[in-house]
């Protein structure tokens, strides 16, 4: 029992305790490869989040080790992520009002809040929330975030001051601002892009961003490029690792972070689960959503306590891990230790990293997220999904990331409610072999004489049962000759004992009886018998016919029809 509890709490640790020696070599190779990719990306995402470069590295070390203990995915690498950093910047920047120390404090607090929300969700087993942001919403969100990041970095790579933090204003001001571009900054940006593309095409498996950062940083130090007006990263001056100061923090700011931290938790968890499930399926195992929710909460609390910012599953670094044959969570530990070595012994050169280099790397990383074709492919395949993805994309661009996410989730819920309120339906019939199928145009399925077989493709509940009743009566009234039987496929629609539904079925049964029509519920006979026995009142239970399935319903109808026909024949003989 104790081992099972430990397995549930620390699945990563249990995997490490069962470690196989043959995994060590591929894990070391994958760990160093992940570190090589994570170093420049973490620094760039720190710039995106609005904190100093070394904070991005803080966000990699202890959180990666924590996930190796508490995470259930053997391939997933956690770390800074474009979407989470963009959300942090959108929330914290206006609150900090240019105060870099306050910005860092708010970032840490928001990270701790996000981790707390994740732990609460895990405690209440809300892992199913991973399905709240559907694939169309996530497609629209990631495309909107990617385009927002790209537009926001243009001023950094071209060297002109940005007049506004709003996306639309930035785009409208772009033609005029291009005339004020800084040529040395453009030159270092172009050099960075050439290094990225050159390494990518010459050696696709090499970490191109790491080469770009190392080479341009060395050039900046050797040629003293800041004297030409090229900006470098700020927030580190040497003489020890930077620490955040808390005495001046105002607790009243916490209330402005509660809901954004909740939104951030949902977005990060959904993104992380998509990555974790994809690589788990590829490698033949499963990940538990509730365990991953808890792991995400713990790693973010660890990140906040170590002065880092919010993190999520990093799909690019996870792909690097998988491509290099990583077998276990030891990859995260090795990558974290490699980054820790850089922080402890090689952190001073961070102050020579040019800002435009990080801007180019962010655009380079965001370009892989930008996939508008994935949205427009939905237009022919699934129009509602296309509308939802496009709405999310435009919402993120026009009203911002946090409000855009809220509007997209609201629209997704409204689409779901519409599906439940007004679901699809089928009339059922039989083919020449007596098999029951949905009737369609020219599909050879014919109705049974005197019988309406109906399927309502949604669970019946209090807010759609009136529509259900109306559909049944409309179908009865629209028939040229009145049917004698109405058979409902109860499997699809009777999923729980809703008192309003059971009362409505009583009413429907009485209305049909007045017209000389018998109501039959086919499927879930045991459950329906128990539900109606507990909740029916003032009605004879024999009036409602319950059978185990549709085929038995037809056999029952045929036997009753034959019996009534025999009785009619006997009466005719007696009269004759």
Image: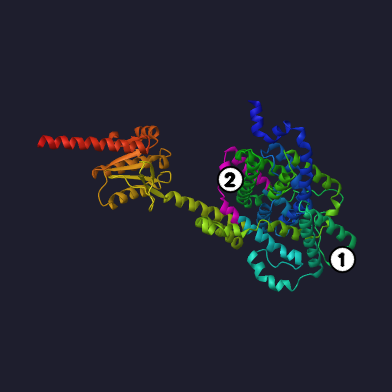
Identify the magenta region: 111-140
Give the side of residue 466 with respect to residue 7, left or right. Answer: left
Farthest residue to the right: give it.
222
In terms of secondary structure, where does tag 2 sit? helix
Q: Which residue is mark 1?
A: 227
Asked whether residue 133 is drawn in magenta, I would say: yes
Q: Which of 511/16 is in front?
A: 16
Question: Horizontal and vertical percent for residue 408?
Answer: 55, 55
Question: Horizontal and vertical percent for residue 430?
Answer: 35, 44
Question: Horizontal and vertical percent for residue 89?
Answer: 68, 56
Q: To which quarter of the image does residue 226 belong?
A: bottom right
Give the side of residue 158 with respect to residue 396, left or right. Answer: right
Farthest residue to the left: give it.
576
Q: Which mark is residue 466?
A: none
Question: Horizontal and vertical percent for residue 272?
Answer: 64, 46
Asked whether residue 27 is drawn in magenta, I would say: no
Q: Which residue is mark 2?
A: 130
Q: To which quarter of the image does residue 326 belong?
A: top right
Give the side of residue 160 with respect to residue 482, left or right. Answer: right
Farthest residue to the front: give it.
432
Q: Quadrant of the C terminus?
A: top left
Residue 304 in view here = no
* CB-based contact (under 8 Å), mark 2 and mark 1: no
Q: To which quarter of the image does residue 490 belong?
A: top left
Q: Where is 164 relative to 245, above or below?
A: below
Q: Which of 483/341 is in front?
A: 483
Check disc 2: other Cα within 10 Å, few if <14, some if 14-19, many if 20+.
Answer: many
Q: Please tell me whether the stretch drawn in magenta is mainly helix, strand or loop.
A: helix
């Amino acid at each position: 029992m104790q081992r099972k509890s430990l397995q549930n709490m620390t699945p990563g640790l249990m995997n490490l305790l069962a470690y196989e020696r043959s995994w060590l070599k591929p894990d070391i190779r994958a760990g160093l490869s992940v570190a090589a990719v994570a170093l420049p990306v973490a620094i760039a995402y720190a710039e995106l989040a609005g904190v100093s470069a070394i904070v991005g590295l803080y966000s990699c070390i202890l959180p990666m080790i924590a996930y190796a203990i508490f995470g259930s995915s053997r391939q997933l690498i956690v770390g800074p992520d474009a979407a989470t950093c963009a959300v942090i910047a959108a929330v914290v920047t206006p609150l900090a009002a240019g105060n870099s120390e306050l910005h860092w404090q708010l970032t840490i607090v928001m990270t701790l809040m996000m981790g707390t929300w994740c732990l609460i969700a895990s405690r209440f087993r809300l892992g199913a929330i991973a399905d709240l942001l559907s694939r169309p919403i996530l497609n629209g969100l990631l495309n909107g975030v990617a385009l927002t990041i790209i537009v926001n970095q243009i001023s950094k790579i071209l060297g002109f001051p940005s007049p506004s933090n709003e996306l639309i204003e930035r785009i409208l001001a772009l033609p005029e601002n291009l005339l004020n571009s800084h040529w040395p900054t453009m030159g270092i940006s172009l050099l960075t892009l050439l290094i990225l593309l050159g390494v990518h095409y010459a050696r696709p498996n090499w970490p191109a961003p790491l080469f770009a950062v190392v080479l341009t940083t060395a050039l900046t130090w050797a040629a003293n490029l800041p004297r030409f007006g090229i900006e470098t990263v700020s927030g580190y001056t040497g003489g020890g690792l930077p620490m955040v100061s808390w005495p001046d923090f105002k607790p009243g700011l916490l209330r402005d972070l509660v809901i954004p931290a909740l939104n951030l938790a949902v977005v990060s968890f959904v993104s992380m689960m998509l990555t974790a499930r994809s690589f788990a399926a590829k490698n033949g195992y499963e990940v538990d959503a509730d365990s991953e929710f808890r792991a995400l909460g713990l790693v973010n609390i660890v990140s906040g306590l170590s002065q880092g910012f919010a993190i999520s599953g990093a799909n690019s670094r996870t792909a690097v891990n998988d491509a290099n044959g990583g077998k276990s969570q030891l990859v995260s530990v090795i990558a974290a230790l490699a980054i820790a070595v850089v922080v402890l012994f090689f952190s001073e050169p961070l102050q020579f990293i040019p800002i435009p280099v990080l801007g180019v790397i962010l655009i380079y990383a965001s370009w892989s997220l930008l996939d508008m074709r994935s949205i427009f492919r939905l237009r022919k395949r699934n129009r509602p999904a296309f509308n939802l993805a496009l709405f999310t994309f435009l919402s993120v661009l026009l009203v911002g990331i946090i409000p855009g996410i809220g509007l997209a989730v609201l629209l997704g819920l409204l689409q779901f409610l519409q599906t439940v309120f007004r679901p699809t339906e089928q009339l059922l019939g039989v083919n020449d072999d007596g098999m029951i199928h949905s009737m369609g145009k020219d599909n050879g399925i014919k109705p049974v004489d005197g019988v309406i077989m109906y399927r309502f493709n949604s669970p019946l509940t209090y807010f759609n049962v009136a529509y259900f009743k109306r559909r049944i009566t409309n179908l009865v009234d629209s028939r040229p000759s009145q049917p004698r039987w109405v058979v409902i496929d109860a499997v699809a629609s009777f999923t729980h004992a809703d008192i309003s539904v059971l009362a409505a079925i009583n009413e429907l049964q009485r209305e049909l009886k007045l017209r000389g029509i018998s109501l039959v519920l086919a499927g879930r006979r045991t459950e329906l018998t128990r539900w109606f026995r507990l909740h029916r009142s003032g009605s004879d239970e024999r009036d409602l016919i319950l059978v185990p399935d549709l085929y038995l319903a037809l056999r029952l109808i045929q036997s009753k029809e034959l019996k009534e026909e025999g009785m009619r024949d006997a009466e005719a003989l007696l009269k004759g």
